[in-house]
Amino acid sequence: MQPAVKARMTENFTALQDINWMRLDWRRELRNNITTVDMLKTYLPLGGREEAELRLVTDIHPMNIPRYYLSLVDPDDPQDPIRRMCVPDAAELVVAGSMGETTADPYGDDKHNKGNGLLHKYSYTALVVTSEYCAMYCRHCFRKRMVGLSNELTVKNFHNAAAYIADHPEITNAILSGGDPFMLPTRVLEEMLAALADIPHLNHVRIGSRVPVSYPLRLFDDDLMALLRDFGERKTLFVPTHFNHAREITPVAREAVYRLRRCGITVNNQAVLLRGVNDTVEALMDLMNGLLRIGVNPYYLYQCMPVARVRHHFQVPLKEGVDIVDRARRYFDGYAKRFKYIIGHDIGKLEICGRIGDKIILKQLHARSGNEDDVSRLMVRTLTDTSGWLDDLPETNL
Ligand code: SF4
């Protein structure tokens, strides 16, 4: 690389460190997102081969990196965990690979799609896919088949979705999901929340968002905070978010979380165990303890799903995952170890309880509508060194 090009790149990247993210207009700043390989290479060094491969990858799965999140990357480390989550990788061209088969929809969303963006997977929960847009397109996303792409899965008429929920008294809670609901204009979110506020059988509402991690500046919008505070006085509001690494817990993210908490919102974290990101005892300890320090509850640690163009390079084998999690738990206080290590499967949610030798013990926490008898059943399966998903595990006995 020519010295002048290298110097400009260093200058561009260094300038990011001086920006006061809390003062930026979140809508205007989105226009500065890095969405092309040409933009990316003005900040980070790319090899010639890497550049060509990234162009192929981004034709399939678009790139979208906020400058804020890019500023967290270590530009000198090609294996940097933050970089792995935001910068496309040639490994995304591999559909299957060493970890076994993949699928576009491992969580069975499409089977439970009631149309108009509404997924009714558990009798008591309605999930509304509110948008296909996110501030950042995470490279490990399990909804990679739709995020950033035009699709038929998102809600078209929220009032019809709310009417479905109102007509089903067994639904106790609604999740606004996506994509990222916080990337909707505040007035659109206001209409959605208003439609849910008067449904008497809803105990609580969740807004699933990675904005506290990838684009915390959105949460410095006072109109949004006022909306959330007002709604919180009518229904209990939770924000499940998705920190995966302690370096994502920046002063800006912490302040964004505090702003949510000041609105009376409980923030829970749903991390994913990812190869090269948080697959060590130390990384998990730093993550869970760091979350507690800013008042975010460690809630789930998901086993990475067998998603096409994700599994091959991000999934950690279950045997290794159990051992990492169990070793980390030795050092956690009671609140840090409250999270559950989870398989979010087509049949429902399964807690990974642990292993005895080459046998893994699972407990089903949630089952799809009509299969409620399966809830709380224990399952014993045989582990190999490479098995990464329930379907890889033959049934066995203790
Ligand atoms: S923010 Fe969530 S839905 Fe959006 S790309 Fe990241 S993981 Fe996927």
Image: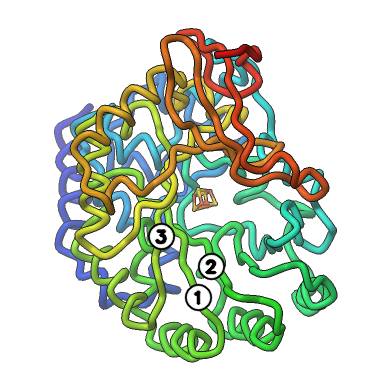
Image: 51 above or below 49: below
Instruction: Give the crowd class for mark 1: few <14, some 14-19, many >=20 residues within 10 Å.
Output: many
Sequence order check: which comes first, mark 1 or mark 3? 1
Quadrant that contains the C terminus: top right
Comparing marks 1 and 2, which lies closer to the viewer?
Answer: 1
In this rendering, position of residue 315 left or right of residue 259: right
> Do labels 1 and 3 touch, CB within 8 Å?
no
Instruction: Give the crowd class for mark 2: few <14, some 14-19, many >=20 residues within 10 Å.
Output: many
Could you say where residue 59 lies in the image, as x and y percent from the top left? Answer: 60, 36
Residue situated in front as seen by the camera: 108 or 68 = 108
User: CB of residue at label 1: within 8 Å of ligand 1?
Assistant: no
Distance between the Cα atoms at labels 1 and 2?
8 Å
Q: Residue at x 66, y 79 (%)?
A: 192
> Do labels 1 and 2 touch, CB within 8 Å?
yes
Sequence order check: which comes first, mark 3 or mark 2? 2
Q: Residue at x 65, y 23 (%)?
A: 102
In this rendering, position of residue 147 left or right of residue 150: left
Distance between the Cα atoms at labels 3 and 2?
11 Å
Residue 268 numbered tag? 3
Distance between the Cα atoms at labels 1 and 3?
11 Å
Q: Amino acid at mark 2?
A: Ile
- Residue where numbered disc 1 is placed: 237
Q: Residue at x 40, y 38 (%)?
A: 87
Instruction: Give the crowd class for mark 3: few <14, some 14-19, many >=20 residues within 10 Å.
Output: many
- Residue where numbered disc 2 is placed: 207
Any part of residue 247 in sight: no
Q: Amino acid at mark 1?
A: Leu
> Do labels 3 and 2 touch, CB within 8 Å?
no
Quadrant that contains the N terminus: top left
Could you say where residue 330 lies in the image, as x and y percent from the top left? Answer: 22, 34
Residue situated in front as seen by the camera: 303 or 256 = 303
Q: Residue at x 78, y 43 (%)?
A: 371
